[in-house]
Amino acid sequence: MRSFLVAGIIILGVGGYILLRGGTFTTRRDVVKVGDVKISADSKESIPSWLGWVAVVAGGALLIAGMRKQA
C-alpha cells in the first residue's frame, strides 16, 4: 500500500537524521515551589543513537512491505 511507503520514507528519514545529526529535547522541571513563586530548571537531553537504528530498521521494513503489496 502507498501508506506503508510514505510512512517508511518518513521514519527512515527521521532515523537517518538522528544517526547523522543527533537529536535533543528539552525537559522542564520545578526545582523550588514556595507559594506562588516557583523556580524551574531546563535540562537538555539527547536522543540515544540506538533509537535512530530502530527507526532505520522499522522504516526499511515498512518500505519493503509497501513494495510487496504493490507488486
Image (cartoon, rainbow, N blue to C red):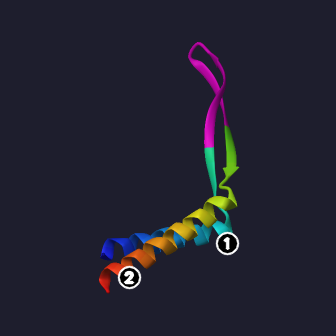
Image quarter (top left, top right, bottom left or bottom right) of the C terminus: bottom left
- Residue most toward the bottom? 71
Bounds of the magenta segment: 27-41
Magenta stretch encompasses residue 4: no
Determine the secondary structure under disc 1: helix
Residue tagged 1: 20
Image quarter (top left, top right, bottom left or bottom right) of the N terminus: bottom left
Quadrant in the picture for residue 69: bottom left
Quadrant in the picture for residue 68: bottom left
Q: Residues within 10 Å of mark 2 (few under 14, many from 20)?
A: some
Q: Looking at the image, which residue is at 61% across and 51% down? A: 25
Residue 34 rendering spot, x and y as whole percentages: 63, 14
Residue tagged 2: 67
Residue 66 rendering spot, x and y as whole percentages: 37, 77
Dot 1 or dot 2: first in sequence order is: 1
Q: Amino acid at mark 2?
A: Met
Q: Looking at the image, which residue is at 40% across and 75% down? A: 65
Q: Is disc 1 in contact with disc 2, using a CB cutoff of under 8 Å? A: no
Q: Looking at the image, which residue is at 62% across and 23% down? A: 38
